[in-house]
Amino acid sequence: MKTQEYHNHEEQIIDMLTPKVEVKPSDDLRERILNAAAQQATTKPRKSRLTYWIGAATSMAAVVAIAITFMLNTPAYAARKYFSTAIIAAQEAKTLIMKLSVRTAPDEPIDYINPSLDFIPATVKVIYGEPMLWSIEKKDGRKVLYKGADAAGDYVYQWIGGKDGRTGWKFNHNGYSTDELEAMLDPRILLEAERRTATRNKGTNYEVLDLGELVIVRVSTTAQGDYSKSDYMLNTSLAEANTIREYSFSKQTGLLWKMRIIIPNDKQPITIVESESIDYNQPLSVDNLYDKEQFSNITFNNVYFEQGQSSPLTGITADEAAKIILEAMGSWDSDILDTAMYYYKGDLMTQIEKKYKGLQVQSIEKSFKSGLYAGRFVKCKVVLADGTKENLTLALRNDNKNKVWLVDGGL
Amino acid sequence: MKLNSGTNIKQLSQWIDEWQEQLFRYAYFRLGNRSDAEDVVQDAFLKIASTTSAIANPKAYLFRIVANGCVDSLRHKSRLKPLEERTSATIPSHSEEMEAEEEFRRIERLLSHLSEAQTEVIRLHIHAGLKFTEIAEMLEEPVTTIKSRFASGIEKLRQQFIN
């Protein structure tokens, strides 16, 4: 006979198996189903809806875009189906070489965009496998590389400065977070993100156009992040911009054939990223991913930061940290700067010392958050040693183990 | 509007109102993400709306289609497993969604100790809130078999985690 203790244990197990989080379908699921059912009812029986509409589309001029969203129930639903097909089609790919044009600055982070800048060529190369090996290169600018684990360790390398670059950073590959542009390493990741966003993001709209041999899926999204306090970060990365993302899929292969990212603008939409070519299964080896000679001349600093709690840059606000750091730059206090400027090493630090040593702080404003940035921004006015006045917006972050404020950008 | 010989919009609306949450909860804790779960649920309602033959037990029918849809979706996902693992770390997520996904993974780890037949009954009973008689009808098995699968699954976990 089962004892009370036994029953208690059973209840414990059932409790462990019971979700502690309540999940509910999206508010609009009911409406989506009813709309789709109504559309479904209007199609002729005995003939597949897909066949019917593709047949109709191919009989018209290819340049006439036909909205076919209704044949797959709702635009988001239709888009998800195309994303899924492309993901499966790309599953067999062994390599990818994608050439892009991006409005960005060469040395800025890979995901940085700026609608007012000219296009810069960028190349993405990927060798699919376990692990996936890859590189992203902005022409004469920042490069990011993962060439697999070797005797030096298992790192993702990043460096800037074109051919003369001497400073780089290395990140532990395990746990390295890819940002928006790096998701382009694997169009499947991008498409998977899009597929999942299709339901999650309430601010997303979908349009599906049939152009004969191609299907275009157009995704309109609003910027992610919090801009209630400041729009400083708005339009600085793809995730932090209102964008229209346009994916062209080959109907024959299902593969992603072309992509374009546009920022809608009151006057005229601005294309931010455009693929020039997407080639799958071209011969590619690890040696083709990067310039070995240049790589061997670079000193890579490990970005894993750990600082004792005794640092003066802990337990204070970002604006207080900015004051300490700028004053330390004035007197060039290496004790403080070695910590605060952890991400600035080698020739980069030499350049900063040359420019900012001897500065005087004029004013520091209250720090603010913007967009998706994990840290805070601090606007400061300084006078350089040669008398030049400069306005800075320091990016400071303290999302490390001991909450030490570090300079992450703005110099 | 008439959808087919047996279903009209009003009827479909009633079914959605009555069962979409249960179906979604079941699909969510089977698949681990909202968009897949909603796709499967939507497909099930569209299928029932387009079925021309009369359906004796629409609830059991819907759960059967959602269960089959989940299996298809998981089969598709298993081909993409390394990709899913990579994307899970990169896609921005609402915190509630992240909590739910974490909860999904926690329960999946527990259920991984059991047979598929046991987990299915546990999911349908605990996650979907179906009675044993409803599960029996849906799976076309005797109620005693369903109860026995549930009990043996719980017992296995009890031995694993409590003894």
Image (spheres, coloured by chain):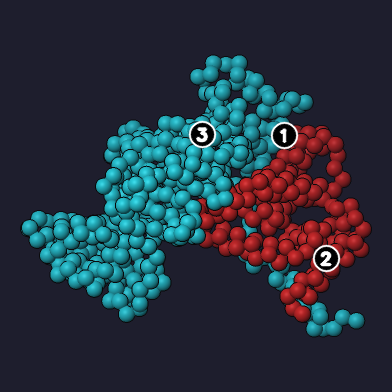
Chain colours: A cyan, B red
Query: Which badge, 1 or 2, is on the more N-terminal residue?
Result: 1
Label 2 chain ID: B
Name the image quarter holding the N terminus of chain A: bottom right
> In the figure, A249 relative to B121: above or below?
above
Could you tell me if the residues under marks 2 and 3 are in contact, i.e. CB atoms within 8 Å?
Answer: no
Distance between the alpha carbons at the discs numbered 3 and 1: 53 Å
Q: Where does label 3 land, which residue? A: A282
Callout 1: SS: loop
Indicate the secondary structure of the residue bearing disc 2. Answer: helix
From the top left corner, tell me how far across and down residue A323 is, in percent. 21, 69
Pair 2/3: label in front: 3
**Residues at marks 3 and 1 on the same chain:** no
Q: Position of residue B76 (x, y in %)?
A: 68, 45
Q: Quadrant of residue A14?
A: bottom right
Find residue A222 and report its image quarter: top left
> Are the numbered discs 1 and 2 placed on the same chain, yes or no?
yes
Residue displayed at 32% across by 75% down: A314
For the point 38% across and 46% down, the residue is A292
Q: Tell me the kind of residue under disc 1.
A: Met
Give the vertical position of A55 relative to A336 (above or below).
Answer: above
Chain of the residue under the numbered disc 3 shown in the image: A
Q: Disc 1 designates what residue?
A: B1
Residue A319 in view here = no
The residue carrying pointer 2 sits among few (fewer than 14), some (14 to 19) or many (20 or more) residues within 10 Å by Cα, namely many
- Gap between marks 2 and 3 measured at Cα: 52 Å
User: Which residue is under mark 2?
Assistant: B150
User: Residues at marks 2 and 3, common chain?
Assistant: no
Q: Nearer the viewer, mark 1 or mark 2?
A: 2
Q: What residue type is disc 2 on?
A: Phe
Specify the subunit that label 1 lies on.
Answer: B
